[in-house]
Image: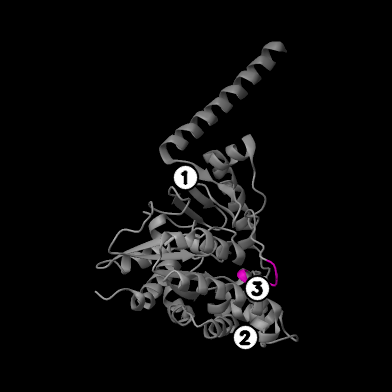
């Protein structure tokens, strides 16, 4: 019995050692895979930010994305940003939440990077991606006032996302990203965050769940975020606290930019429910007998905010609707974040619209 038990322990130990060795080789050869978001650090003035000088793969097997992410010395995605700004450089600062950060795609495939490349030439255009996953409107505003404006941007582009709508009268930045669940810390968190084996086991589990979902005949549910749902049904902006308070925050961004000689641009993120006829039909079915949604509600609201604040406005929705039949999809599977095709579309629209704000060549 002792010999048999010893052989079992030896086999189990050998298997575990082999797995760990394979994981170590993959880690060295391919870099870490982040399946747990533990790359944040607290910041007193605006909640939190991403840690500087990171390199990792950000992946989710179920949704189908895997992006390579680098952060610079400031914790921003992409190359280092010189301070003070070099002469002859036109700097565009992109602020917002996970839609702007674009961790789901590689660094060069984010809409900010694409916009910067399309605007390249003389003057030299530098696109700075300051998006952070999980940011609420107060995080974005606080970052701009405390750190973003110090980068001396010529243009600041804020991409509004439905969950940025706020009804909080007080300045309340989130202190960590809870939008994707709890952030693990310590040994367990680091193993989960860096292990290729963890990623592959999760891939098998989620692929099985996906096959099960595809094989069923049940109606597929579409995610309806609270903020966007509110904007689909809201009509009187002046009398709604969330509409008024959100406008006030955006006005503070605009005034901050004006005070430092920068141009503020309000852009809307292209959401599936605003663009996809199938998703809109599902929404009407869910609201049958209650209310007819205005699928242009978010656009109408942002138009109203821009007119009240007096800032520039970029509306990508019409072009996304026109291109949907040809391009088929702009988002990841059951996820509201843009895929590479969506980032390219949005980056191209922004480049065309922002060109008017660049210095004459």
Q: Residue at x 25, y 67 (%)?
A: 121
Question: Is label 2 or label 1 in front?
Answer: 1
How far from the left and from the top, in percent, is residue 128? 41, 60
Q: Nearer the viewer, residue 150 or 221?
A: 150
Q: Residues within 10 Å of mark 2 (few under 14, many from 20)?
A: some
Q: Residue at x 34, y 79 (%)?
A: 356
SS of the residue under disc 2? loop
Q: Which residue is mark 1?
A: 54
Residue 293: quadrant of the picture? bottom right
Q: Which residue is mark 2?
A: 294
Work out how far the residue at label 1 is from the one at label 3, CA to CA, in angstroms: 32 Å
For residue 179, say whether it is visible: yes
Work out how far the residue at label 3 is from the one at label 2, CA to CA, in angstroms: 13 Å
Mark number displayed over residue 227: 3
Task: Assign the N terminus to one quadrant of the image.
Answer: top right
The answer to which of marks 3 and 2 sits earlier in the sequence is 3
SS of the residue under disc 3? helix
Task: Assign the C terminus to one quadrant of the image.
Answer: bottom left
From which residue to which does the magenta span run? 164-170
| Membership of 166 in magenta stretch | yes
The answer to which of marks 1 and 3 sits earlier in the sequence is 1
């Amino acid at each position: 019995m002792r010999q048999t038990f010893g052989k079992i322990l030896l086999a189990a130990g050998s298997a575990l050692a082999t797995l760990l060795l394979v994981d170590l080789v993959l880690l060295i050869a391919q870099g870490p895979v982040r399946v747990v978001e533990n790359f944040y650090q607290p910041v007193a003035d605006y909640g939190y930010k991403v840690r500087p000088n990171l390199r990792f793969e950000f992946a989710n097997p179920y949704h189908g994305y895997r992006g390579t992410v680098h952060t610079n010395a400031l914790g921003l995605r992409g190359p280092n940003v010189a301070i003070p700004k070099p002469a002859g450089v036109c700097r565009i600062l992109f602020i917002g939440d996970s839609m702007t950060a674009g961790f789901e795609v590689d660094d060069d495939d984010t809409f900010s990077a694409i916009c910067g490349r399309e605007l390249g030439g003389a003057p030299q255009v530098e696109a700075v991606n300051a998006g952070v996953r999980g940011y609420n409107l107060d995080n974005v505003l606080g970052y701009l006032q405390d750190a973003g404006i110090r980068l001396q941007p010529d243009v600041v582009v804020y991409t509004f996302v439905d969950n940025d709508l706020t009804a909080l009268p007080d300045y309340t930045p989130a202190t960590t990203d809870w939008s994707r669940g709890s952030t693990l810390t310590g040994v367990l968190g680091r193993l989960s965050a860096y292990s290729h084996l963890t990623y592959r086991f999760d891939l098998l589990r989620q692929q099985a769940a996906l096959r099960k979902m595809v094989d069923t005949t049940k109606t597929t549910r579409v995610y309806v975020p609270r903020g966007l749902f509110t904007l689909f049904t809201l009509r009187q902006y002046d009398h709604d606290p969330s509409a008024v308070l959100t406008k006030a925050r955006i006005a503070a961004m605009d005034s901050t930019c004006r005070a430092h000689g920068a141009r503020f641009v309000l852009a809307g993120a292209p959401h599936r429910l605003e663009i996809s006829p199938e998703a809109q039909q599902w929404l009407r079915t869910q609201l049958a007998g209650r209310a007819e949604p205005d699928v242009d509600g978010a656009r109408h609201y942002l138009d109203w905010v821009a007119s009240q604040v007096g800032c520039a406005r970029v509306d990508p929705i019409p072009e996304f609707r026109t291109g949907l039949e040809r391009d088929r999809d702009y988002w990841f599977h059951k996820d509201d974040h843009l895929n590479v095709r969506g980032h390219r579309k949005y980056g191209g629209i922004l480049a065309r619209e922002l060109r008017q704000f660049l210095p004459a060549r």
